[in-house]
Image (tube, coloured by chain):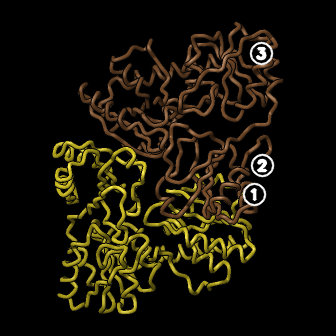
Chain colours: A yellow, B brown
Amino acid sequence: MKIPGYEIDLEKAVKIIKNKKYERVLLQITEGLKIHISKFIEFLEEETSASVIISADQCFGACDVVSSELKDMKIDFVIQIGHTQLPNIEDYLIPTLFINAKSDIDISIVIKKAVHVIKGKKIGLITTSQHIDSLKHAIKILKDNNFEPIIGKSSSRVESDGQILGCDFSAARSISKQVDTFLYIGSGNFHPLGLALSTNNPVIVCDPYTNQVKVDELIDIKDMILRQRYGAIARSKDAKIFGILIGTKKGQQRIELALKIKDKLNSKKKKSILLIQNHFTASILESFRDIDCFVSTACPRIAIDDYMQYKVPIITPIELDILLGIKKWEDYQFDEILI
Amino acid sequence: MKIPGYEIDLEKAVKIIKNKKYERVLLQITEGLKIHISKFIEFLEEETSASVIISADQCFGACDVVSSELKDMKIDFVIQIGHTQLPNIEDYLIPTLFINAKSDIDISIVIKKAVHVIKGKKIGLITTSQHIDSLKHAIKILKDNNFEPIIGKSSSRVESDGQILGCDFSAARSISKQVDTFLYIGSGNFHPLGLALSTNNPVIVCDPYTNQVKVDELIDIKDMILRQRYGAIARSKDAKIFGILIGTKKGQQRIELALKIKDKLNSKKKKSILLIQNHFTASILESFRDIDCFVSTACPRIAIDDYMQYKVPIITPIELDILLGIKKWEDYQFDEILI
């Protein structure tokens, strides 16, 4: 079906529901598409006889997989709109279909604009799921202008090559030594910031919605974040009790890492408490008043993007290693969920 | 083990952990006891070799049962401190021990004070889990003063007779026709308010922490809440789209009721959307802007206790029946989770 700006293959879901005779269907919808909820429900209710139930939880990524309680309630099919599947997750408690929200925006205008400012020859092309089908247009334009576009191979956590997630920049890291610069196609700072932090290459941002080409803006944001990270580590030097966060979301269960961190802190005579939750927020964690520093093994973005909301510093596992003197600041790396 | 004000049989948990050789133990702790977290962890870490992990989620009741993700992470035992088990729930994904927090406060002072103001002869004695063992002292004092104390039978959702939960007042309802008045032992308004709303008998509150006997205070609060409920129904008369809330917590999964409500609204030509979540909050639900009224089949207390936080009215299933003209205001009943 078409919604303004996107093509969403809800028809595929309809076929499966009819074919499998599913009766209770759960819809998980990424935040940006929630304004279209009524259209999704209407479409499914008109085309099928299933009861359609909306997950009211915020759905930040394909790691947000539903849990056993929904099975208790006889929900027999889950549709997640706006994310591509994490291919390394195979065992879904309830059959789950991921439907990408494919943007119908024309990316050629902004790419044609970008060719005038790109320095270097080898260009790493990077984007997110909604523009993945448009990469071919970008490749053609770059080649026509004598650049050498390169698509990096993604890890097995990511559906397409050239695609990044907020917690997986393997498509960029795999080619960072070959390329002169990255060209990121998409809007917002969330993804390109991770891209800039996870490699040392320059990043040009091509926003097809505003047709803006941003060459330097990201450098300032990256610098600010790195200063913040340095500050977070410095502020935690004298921490007496650490809170180690473990996320329960299927794509981010790093309990083994968390247990190793506890052992590491023990060996340095530092106290720590293991905390588990599905969706961590600063306000929930405020009730643990004894804790001087949080180390997050949950979504890597919590420490970076929500930093200002926390009253005590929140750091990543790599940053803890720097704090403990196991790694040096010069070895700073952006935390990603690796498999 | 002893903590200030309470006796908590964590020794029982230690025995089970050693006996079953559990390695990863999750602690769920009721909000009021969270300040003692460090003591619980220290005790378990000293007495066993298990890794102790804290659930950072707020744990409001025994309905808050952990879900499958924790099993994925090889957590093999769950201890919930501060609630008694819901005996009707038997199938736990991970073996779960409920440890009551037994108050060590002496209730006799306030009961002796109360005997001077009680009107009537037959007294329904009601309390919550932490004072359940003290009921026997209250019985003796009342008998010594020529009253006839009666302990009401609880439903199969409640561990002890005479005990109420925020969503189950069967211990009171089962004897409401026999008794002249209820005598509630405990602090706060949460439980006695539900008690006052679920029966029509007078309720005397005996607070053993302040030794206050409250005879009339509850009448005012009950009146205020009933005025609020009447207002919520009136404000929803012209609602075009209803949001029907379904809770995923094991003890409050009323999806069948939710589906019936949707059919009922359909038959009255009213639109509705089914929304599912583990822990509903007003802020999360604000993103569903089309909805004019929420009907909660999740925890019955959300509509009553959190009412002021919601921008659109939130009502209970019984209140919806009144709104739709299926029931009359005179038939108003407090929503409880019945089995």
Q: Are marks 1 and 2 in contact (CB under 8 Å)?
A: yes
**Which label is found at residue B285?**
none
N-term mark: 1 or 3: 1
Of residue A136 and residue B185, the one placed in the foreground of this image is B185
Of residue A27 and residue A40, the one placed in the foreground of this image is A27
- The residue under the point 46% across, 73% down is A337
Please provide percent x and percent y for residue B154. 58, 26
Q: Residue furthest front?
A: B19
Q: CA distance from mark 1 to mark 3?
A: 39 Å
* A221 relative to A5, above or below: below
Identify the chain of the residue marked 1, using the numbered disc in the image: B
Identify the chain of the residue marked 2, using the numbered disc in the image: B
Please provide percent x and percent y for residue B210. 79, 28
Q: Which quadrant of the rendered structure holds the C terminus of chain A?
A: bottom left
Please rate how many residues cluster around mark 2, counting C-alpha atoms within 10 Å: few if below 14, some from 14 to 19, many from 20: few
- The residue under the point 72% across, 11% down is B148
Q: For residue A1, say whether it is visible.
A: no
Under mark 1, the amino acid is Phe
- The residue at which mark 1 appears reads as B43
Say if labels 1 and 3 share a chain: yes
- The residue under the point 56% across, 13% down is B200
Identify the chain of the residue marked 3, using the numbered disc in the image: B
- The residue at which mark 2 appears reads as B1
- The residue at which mark 3 appears reads as B142
Taking the image as shown, residue A105 lies to the left or right of residue A279, namely left
Under mark 3, the amino acid is Leu
- The residue under the point 44% across, 14% down is B331
Badge 3 element: helix
Q: CA distance from mark 2 to mark 3?
A: 31 Å
Badge 1 element: helix
Of residue A76 and residue A225, the one placed in the foreground of this image is A76
